[in-house]
Amino acid sequence: MNVRKVTVLLSIVAALIVLALAGCGGGGKKAETTTTSPTTTPKRVAATPTTAPPISAEGGVRVVEVTNHDLAGSGAYRFDPKDFVFKIGETVTIRVTAESEFHTFNVDELGIALELNPGQTVGKTFTFNRAGTFKLYCIPHQDKGMVGTFTIRALGP
């Protein structure tokens, strides 16, 4: 086999290897998670894809997973889920993921104000001490329908 044929053959093999590796998704970036609590400093950890249900438990604390959807991602501005019900005294960790645009997750009366960059997940733990129904909204997208509700119920018999 002459040198020219060997060079062409090696070039083809190298191109096929590059294509195969590119198809494995090795070039994507992982989202970051920012976890904060009133007594700790935020720390960043790599987020892992999850197929867990939207509500789970972590160390005895209820965890609620929320996605902020948008036009560049799923095609509509909305929270998923958008309506929440909790009890007074309940401690909940809320983890919010921004789909592909900048978003916020705000409930003014409950002191909830999270900002998320595209693809980022931000988590924060809250203990609810006030009953009522409160407006959830995304600052840049509330006029596009990105709203929901937080209902906090008093403890009953």
Image (cartoon, grey):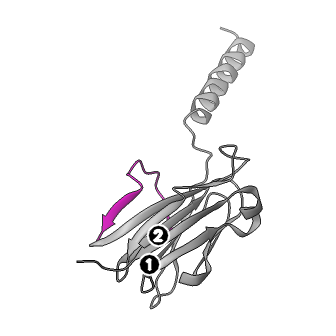
Name the image quarter holding residue 15. top right
For numbered disc 2, what is the local secondary structure?
Answer: strand
Relative to residue 19, is residue 37 drawn left or right? Answer: left
Residue at the (57%, 59%) spot, across then down: 31
Check whether the beta carbons of the residues at disc 1 and disc 2 lie within 8 A of each other. Answer: yes
At label 2, the amino acid type is Ile
Q: Position of residue 103 (x, y in %)?
A: 68, 64
Based on the picture, tell me whether residue 112 belongs to the magenta stretch: no
Crowdedness near tag 1: few (<14), some (14–19) or many (≥20) residues, C-alpha within 10 Å: some
Would you name the residue on which mark 2 appears? Answer: 94
Residue at the (68%, 66%) spot, across then down: 138
Q: Position of residue 32 (x, y in %)?
A: 56, 64
Residue 125, label in figure:
1
Task: State whether residue 94 is above or below residue 26.
Answer: below
Quarter of the N terminus within the rendering: top right
Residue that sits furthest to the bottom in the current view: 39
Task: State whether residue 154 is above or below residue 1.
Answer: below
Magenta-colored span: 45-58
Residue at the (70%, 43%) spot, across then down: 75
Kindly report the distance in space between the C-alpha atoms of the residues bearing marks 1 and 2.
6 Å
| Nearer-N-terminus badge (1/2) | 2
For numbered disc 1, what is the local secondary structure?
Answer: strand
Residue at the (31%, 79%) spot, across then down: 155
Residue that sits furthest to the top in the current view: 1
Relative to residue 42, is residue 116 drawn left or right? Answer: right
Towards the viewer: 82 or 104? 82
At label 1, the amino acid type is Thr
Q: Is residue 111 visible?
A: no
Towards the viewer: 58 or 78? 78
Task: State whether residue 39 is above or below residue 145.
Answer: below
Q: Position of residue 90 (x, y in %)?
A: 35, 78
Q: Position of residue 143 (x, y in %)?
A: 77, 61
